[in-house]
């Protein structure tokens, strides 16, 4: 009897393992697809940046730059609401991990360096650069607060996410306002459209906004559970 019971237990365990395999393979396949989407997106942006497509004349709206930033965000929204598979994939992401990932935002220090070289106006680089440094340096703390599972931790994460989005929106608004002449400055923001910095503008900015929105979606899902 004991032997038969052990055999049944092994069969059940083996069956459970077999059932988990397709689920794990599906998850890995989605992550692989997402990785290649990001990779293709990066090389498209890289090619356009090297070719100087994002650089426009001062006094005119940066149309191509705006499209490069806005279209991926809009596409992400449309896919999220139109595809249940995309929603499941997004909601399967670990919000703590994608929050800590935004430590890369400290790269915003580059705007302060360019400002010191008189290649960006302080009106733009100071709020954008210090804002990015703050968000990037506090990303691990926001992730830790969220991981605690406490209400206070969720409030801290929510506040950090809102500030992170405002920092990005502030950079976009200031950049456009200076570019079209609404905020006259001796130095323009064309450096943000040139190869190197344009990768931050048209690649990392939309990714950061999408990561913030995914994190907030995860927070909302957790609150409804």
Image: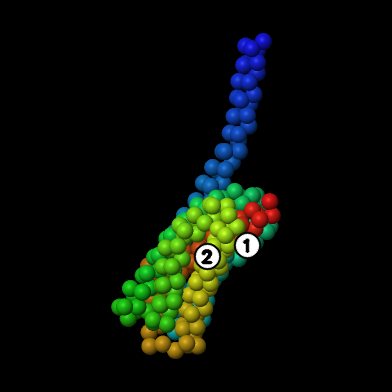
Horizontal side of 122 relative to 12 (left or right) equals left
Q: Is residue 93 above or below residue 63?
A: above
State which quadrant residue 76 falls in: bottom right
Residue 79 visible in this rendered orientation of the protein: no
Residue 22: give x, y in percent of width and height.
60, 35
Task: Bin the neighbour count of mark 1 within 10 Å (Cα to Cα): few under 14, some 14-19, many 20 and up.
Answer: few
* Residue extending furthest toward the left: 117
Asked whether the residues under the numbered discs 1 and 2 touch, taking CB atoms below 8 Å apart as contact, a structural biologist would say no
* Residue at image coords 44%, 89%: 184
How far apart are the two marked residues, 1 and 2, measured between alpha carbons?
21 Å
**Residue under pointer 1:** 77
Between label 1 and label 2, give the one nearer the viewer: 2
Colouring method of the image: rainbow
- Up-down relation of residue 177 to residue 137 (above or below): below
Q: Earlier in the sequence, mark 1 or mark 2?
A: 1
Screen quadrant of the N terminus = top right
| Quadrant position of residue 26 | top right
* Helix, strand or loop for disc 1: helix
Q: Indicate the position of residue 19 as horizontal and vertical percent values.
A: 63, 32
- The answer to whether residue 141 of the structure is visible from this angle is yes
Give the labeled residue for mark 2.
160
Residue 83 in the image: x percent, y percent? 67, 54
Q: Which mark is residue 138?
A: none
Image height of 116 relative to 3, above or below:
below
């Amino acid at each position: 009897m004991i032997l038969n019971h052990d055999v049944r237990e092994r069969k059940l365990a083996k069956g459970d393992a077999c059932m988990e395999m397709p689920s794990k393979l599906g998850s890995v396949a989605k992550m692989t697809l997402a990785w290649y989407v990001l990779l293709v997106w990066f090389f498209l942006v890289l090619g356009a940046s090297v070719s100087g497509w994002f650089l426009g004349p001062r006094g005119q709206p940066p149309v191509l730059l705006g499209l490069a930033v806005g279209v991926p965000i809009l596409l992400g929204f449309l896919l999220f609401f139109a595809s249940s598979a995309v929603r499941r994939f997004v909601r399967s992401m670990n919000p703590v991990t994608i929050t800590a990932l935004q430590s890369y935002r400290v790269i915003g220090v580059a705007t302060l360096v360019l400002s010191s070289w008189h290649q960006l106006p302080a009106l733009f680089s100071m709020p954008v650069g210090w804002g990015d440094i703050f968000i990037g340096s506090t990303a691990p703390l926001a992730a830790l607060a969220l991981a605690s599972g406490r209400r206070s931790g969720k409030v801290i994460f929510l506040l950090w996410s809102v500030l992170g989005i405002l920092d990005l929106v502030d950079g976009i608004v200031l950049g456009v306002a200076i570019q079209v002449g609404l905020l006259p400055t001796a130095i323009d923001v064309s450096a943000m459209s040139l190869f190197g910095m344009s990768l931050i503008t048209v690649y990392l900015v939309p990714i950061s906004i999408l990561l913030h929105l995914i994190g907030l979606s995860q927070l909302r899902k957790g609150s409804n559970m």
